[in-house]
Amino acid sequence: MVGKVEALNIDKLAFMNQSHVRMKDRKKVEAMLNDLVDGGIRKLQVVTDFDFTLTKQRMDNGEKVLTSFGMFERCKSLPPSYIVEARKLYDKYRPIEIDPHMTLEQKLPYMIEWWSASGNILKGFRLPRKEIEEVAEHFKNALRDGTHEMFRELYSHNIPCLVFSAGLGDSVVSVLKHANVLYPNVKVISNFLKYKDDEMLDGLGEHDRMIHTFNKNETALPPEYHELVHDRDHIILMGDSLGDATMANGVPSQSHILKIGFLFDHPEQNLPAYLEKFDIVLIDDQTMDVARAIIELVEKGSSSAN
């Protein structure tokens, strides 16, 4: 054993001192980084959102990246009536979801209504599974720069990666598969289409369990995943919405959770709220450079300690 790794000084980490990297409490982040490095890769897991977290807001050619449900709506077999009804639901419930004046308890019944209604309009018409694959193929290059390398690094060290999405899991899995990053250590928890047969849709949600914005946390995980990560209490969490900051709720209270938030829309207006929820906020960063640099620090710390 070489001994304890020399403590990190955040002021000497170039990637943490870029203009788009913001923190409310630099000393707290420095302490958390040192905790992650001291724990090493055997204590580490990654929990990440999909839409606009693993994916960019815009592709290199300027094309807007769609959400996982937006990708689904590109399927050519979808009846026009579905698009109309889905938009009505969005217009009704989305303002409630983001209303800053309503509490979580007040919003929750409406979110359950939304996802239940979304499942009901996904019944009774045919949709070949290959159509989702075709749309996902188009968006396989929508992942943030460096995401492929990050997934490869996580796999090489057998670090569990949980992709948690309140969107459509069929699209999420298809994009990750076409991007060649759906490694065995990657687990996707999301809403998946239900079929009566190979093509007839019968609603949404695995075992009628809906994943929505306010239950998207580790309390919704199956027991086998808890068993996999029960001794990995050092967590890098990544998301793009304020609700994503709670994705690690349900893990042991002694866990070390470093929260990274990607902020794109109206940064001047939204930055204060993001700094309250996330330890590190990245403004209009279309890369995974910061997350990869942190994982590399943990990896080097593990190597130095052996």
Image (cartoon, rainbow, N blue to C red):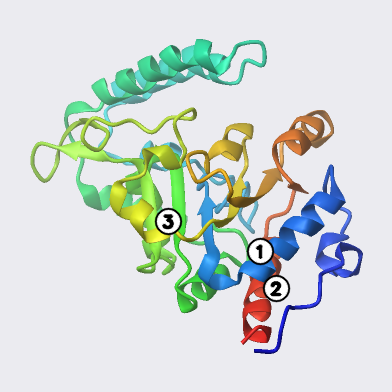
What residue is disc 2 on? 297
Q: Nearer the viewer, mark 1 or mark 2?
A: 1
Labels 2 and 3: the sequence-earlier one: 3
Residue 30 visible to the viewer: yes
Which label was assigned to residue 230?
3
Contact? badges 1 and 2 (CB < 8 Å): yes
User: Looking at the figure, which quarter contains the C terminus?
Assistant: bottom right
From mark 2 to mark 3, how far is it between C-alphas?
22 Å
Q: Residue 205: x, y in percent?
A: 27, 34
Labels 1 and 3: the sequence-earlier one: 1
Q: Nearer the viewer, mark 2 or mark 3?
A: 3
Dot 2 surroundings within 10 Å: few (below 14), some, or many (20 or more)? many
Q: Residue 91: x, y in percent?
A: 50, 15
Q: Find the residue positioned furthest to the right.
A: 11
From mark 1 to mark 2, how far is it between C-alphas?
9 Å
Identify residue type, mark 1: Leu
**Position above or below: 106 against 137:** above
Q: Residue at x 43, y 30 (%)?
A: 212
Q: Considering the numbered disc 2 on the image, is that residue within a helix, a strand or a loop?
A: helix
Q: Residue at x 70, y 36 (%)?
A: 277
